[in-house]
Amino acid sequence: MPSSDPTLAYSLPIPKGWGRVTGLGAHAPAGHPEILGIFAPDPDIEGPRIIVSVTRLRWDVDPAEWVRHGWELAGWSIAMARPLEARWHPRFEVGGLKTIDGRVEVRRATGFVDNGRLLRVDVAGPASTWKRMHDVLWPCGVLMALERPTYRREVEPQVHRGGPHMAFYLPESWIARPQPPPWLDTARWVAEPATAAQGSVGLRIDATRWQYDRPEPIETRQHRLHHELWTHGIAPGRQPKRIPPGSALGTAGLLGVYVATARDREQTFELRFAHRDVDGWSLDYTAVIASPERCPLDRMRAIRALEIAVATTQIRPKEHTPHAA
């Protein structure tokens, strides 16, 4: 039961005989981790240990990217960063290595977001003992749970956007507006952060009615997209690579999420594509995502906004549109 905030009461398994290290600090400023508990086999926390922390977020961000960026700033070499199969919350894990005072330290974090707070369990220790301790420490983070979770994954309120053919949600800090349709039987919307962004990210959603009662293949849709990007001075890289869908996992009709590099005359950046087929319509999402070196916060917000839009887009039936007879 953290004394700083009773709503952060949590439970997790710890190895038998381990104790809790006392004398922890008080509140940390927003955006920085606040230590809720450190558990170790003895007061010497230079050896294997478990660290429980919370970070109060302001924006909807991809949590794995958030942790990864913080570790990189602290000098950690990232070994992996990925989503985990969800239990009650969509979870993630990040692993890293760092040389400290001549010895290699290993750290592996698992966590989730609940009601605007990023809860995290780091298991850490010297590389010399990691192989022996890994199987003991791994369940500690995966099984950590709040005593009174809200199950609210969002940090910001979500705002309803869209037009007569489709509707979707985005974080409150994003704006969206319709664009002229690029081809027949298509609706297009574009979105971007309204505040605290450097103009290096954006999201586009195209909804296209099926022709001949069947959707076009993904390859055809991506080829058309590449051609459109070329005409706007953007050179996509090689064939897009399929990646995990993050919190959009399980969305009805989701065909896949893909990533590719691209560049214009000024910079190199990342493109993410997602494709859904639902209710006689093809939904194609294109996200321009800043490089982690130039605009890390913009990048995290864009990844999360894409996942929210993919998971919440709905096609509006004809009788619900203003053009219905």
Image (cartoon, rainbow, N blue to C red):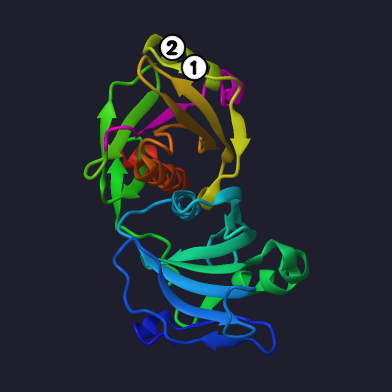
Q: Which mark is residue 115?
A: none
Local packing at callout 1 (Cα closer than 10 Å; few below 14, some 14-19, many 20+) is some
**In this view, 29 is above or below 287:** below
Instruction: Residue under label 1, please give it.
Output: 226
The kind of residue on which mark 1 rests is His
The kind of residue on which mark 2 rests is Trp
* Residue 212 highlighted magenta (yes or no): yes
Q: Which mark is residue 230?
A: 2
- Helix, strand or loop at label 1? It is helix
x%, y% of residue 198? 27, 36
Q: Would you say the residues marked 2 and 1 are in contact, meaning their CB atoms lie under 8 Å apart?
A: yes
In this rendering, would 40 be left or right of 207? Answer: right
Mark 2 and mark 1: Cα distance apart in space = 6 Å
Residue 217 showing in the rendered view: no
- Work out whether residue 322 or residue 273 is closer to the camera in this orientation and state it: 273
In this rendering, would 110 be left or right of 303? Answer: right
**In this view, 166 is above or below 60:** above
The residue under the point 43% across, 11% down is 230
- Work out whether residue 134 or residue 139 is closer to the camera in this orientation and state it: 134
x%, y% of residue 177? 25, 34
The residue under the point 56% across, 45% down is 245
**In this view, 225 is above or below 49:** above
Residue sitting farthest toward the left:
195
- Work out whether residue 188 or residue 171 is closer to the camera in this orientation and state it: 171
The residue under the point 46% across, 30% down is 270
Highlighted magenta segment, given as a residue range = 198-221
